[in-house]
Amino acid sequence: MTRAGSACPLDCPDACSLEVQVENGIAIAVGGTRVNPLTAGYICAKVRRFPEHVHGPARVRDPGIRVGTKGEGRFRTASWEEALDLIASKMAALSASGQGEAILPVSYGGSNGYLSQDTTDARLFSRLGASRFARTVCSAPSSRAAVGLYGKMAGIALDDYAHAKLAVVWGANPHASGIHLLPHLQAARRAGGRLVVLDPRQTRLAAEADLHLPLRPGTDLPVALAVHRWLFANGAADIAFLEKHATGWEELRRRAERWTIARAAAVAGVLEEDLERFARWYAESAPAAIRCGWGLERNRNGGSATAAILALPAVAGKFGVRGGGYTLSNSAVWELDSLRSARTEPSPAREINMNRTGEALLDRDRPVRVLFVYNCNPLMTLPEQEKVRKGLEREDLFTVVFDPVMTDTALYADVVLPATTFLERTEVSRGYGAYVLQEAEAVIPPVGQSRPNHDVFAELCRRAGVERPGDASTGAELTREILAGNPSGPSWRASFDRQSPGAPPFGRNPIQFVDVFPRTADRRAHLCPPELDAEAAPSGLYGYREDPATAAHPLALVSPATDQTISTTLGELRREIAIMEMHPADALARGISSGDRVSASNASGQVSCIVRVAPTLRPGVVSVPKGLWSHNTFGGSTANAVVPDTLADLGGGACFNDARVEVERLPAG
Ligand code: SF4
């Protein structure tokens, strides 16, 4: 048995450094190391099961060509030659006849590795003139807000939460995602700090908090604006800081004016005194840290809500001390993500918003002819699931799925291609919570005939006739090209801070407005940027959009992350029927008891599973886990079957938490 170092590139803020135990070319166990100091030698339960994902029965080991009907998942084994020639010839023919945009590449964060996305794949699709795919399903609204207000300034390092006298965890559940924040929250509380959690559900963290505000989904915006109003009205706004370091704060103040504590509490369904207590604690505490998560962006008000939350430390004067300020995503500090988009050559092709993939697949006027899916399981992850399914069923659609495992989407493929996992390839990845950039070599040989993404897309470039001399194509060439953009160069770990290149790795966590400043042109915070205001039309930035509930569909359905999957990654290992949670009052009104089979439905579709009646959920809200596969429900549809493809106010983001449903008990099966 040997032990080899690796790094987790999955869609999680923490970017654990790993040790993999290998026996005869098989990964038998995965654990943590201390190479990444934040993750400190331990990892989540999800990735501990990664060997089952790598070597399990769902693994795609060979290229396959469909022999059954779509959805059946029957394939004959093919050679790479045959599969790639088939795919390349179809795409090249469309491109040559001026129909490049009939090719739709669909990918997301199945791996956040720099080699596995936006390298040779971006080159292939942009040169073919394929439709451009806007990856908006997560973090699009919050990213727009973070760019608009602060130019994506580096946030509080997660270990610096230990210094906070008030830690606010807003729309995040670190017991499920980003677990390495927890010990630092606990340390802060041991040192006398308070914890406030804002979440519609009473999560484990919320149950332990000094104050839990169980907001109605989609009401984070009025709550944040009410805190702003309270700060200004009670002399707790730091006017000196705002005058020196911010613009737009007077307009923010004006827009917050209508949101009294009483009004916001009524809209959000929380106690007025609790909301006022939160505002007072925030004003009084220093350092005060806000961990802004992604749960609050997944609705019609998501961009404005994130902006209002990120503006709080500026208005309250919370920057300038260790443990004071905010954290959202720290991905931008590497300045490598911009290189990703640089590889996508300018193209006049149409852009398709990821949240409307179903609609695009059903569009008969500008039809998609070739769908190429990688790093993604769109049938299970996208809104309007039934539209996506109908699109995948189209006999005239040629679908390629390139994935390590046979996902629900892959069952509809015409060609499946076996992809390596990160244990079987070189990968470069960064944390978007942890300040760490890691390069890891393969620790086991590729399983079956699987190949790395960058290698297969380079080969497709060749076969489709779009390769050019000098293209970086191998893992080593691409790694060199990627790391050339980082001031610290290629290294296992690198300094995060562009302002002090050459500083030892993790030499100093940044203090906002001391070590790092807004990356806006004037290095000031823009608290009401005109470009966001225009984008959020017609309600404008900080304009509240009402709840979409109707009498027929009164319940808000939320689909939070769990400690079992990362989006749908590893979902093949979770075999049980999912549990829907429901408040006792809602259950009583519908004659529903724990253990019943239930269905949540609306005009878009339905999801059926088993119910647990639980006071941990606020009345009017039901919860079905994120990341389910078809085998986790009765009937094969998941929460996304009832999620609309409406868009958030900023970034064209998804509105998962705007699903409104009615729930009924099903006959015992
Ligand atoms: S998913 Fe997150 S917590 Fe789990 S191993 Fe990867 S980086 Fe660590």
Image (cartoon, helix red, strand yellow):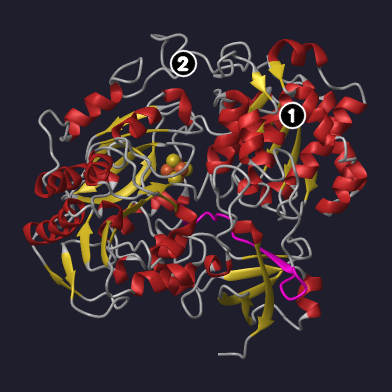
Foreground mark, 2 or 1, reads 1
Residue found at x 63% / y 86%: 666
**72 displayed left or right of 462:** right
Asked which quadrant contains residue 455, the reply is top left
Q: Is residue 459 magenta?
A: no
Residue found at x 60% / y 42%: 650
**Frontmost residue, 359 versus 669:** 359
Q: Where is residue 85 in the image (x, y as percent from the top left)?
A: 10, 57
Is the distance from the Cβ of mark 2 to the nearest ligand 1 atom less than 8 Å?
no
The amino acid sitting under disc 2 is Asp
Asked which quadrant contains residue 512, the reply is top right
**Frontmost residue, 618 versus 396:** 396
The image's mark for residue 497 is 2
Q: How far apart are marks 2 and 1 (CA)?
A: 24 Å
Q: Where is residue 292 in the image (x, y as percent from the top left)?
A: 64, 37
User: Magenta residues?
Assistant: 550-566
Quarter of the image with the N terminus in it: top left
Is the distance from the Cβ of mark 1 to the nearest ligand 1 atom less than 8 Å?
no
- Position of 375 relative to 357 (above/below): above
Q: Position of residue 66 (x, y in %)?
A: 20, 73
Q: Does the magenta stretch include residue 557?
A: yes
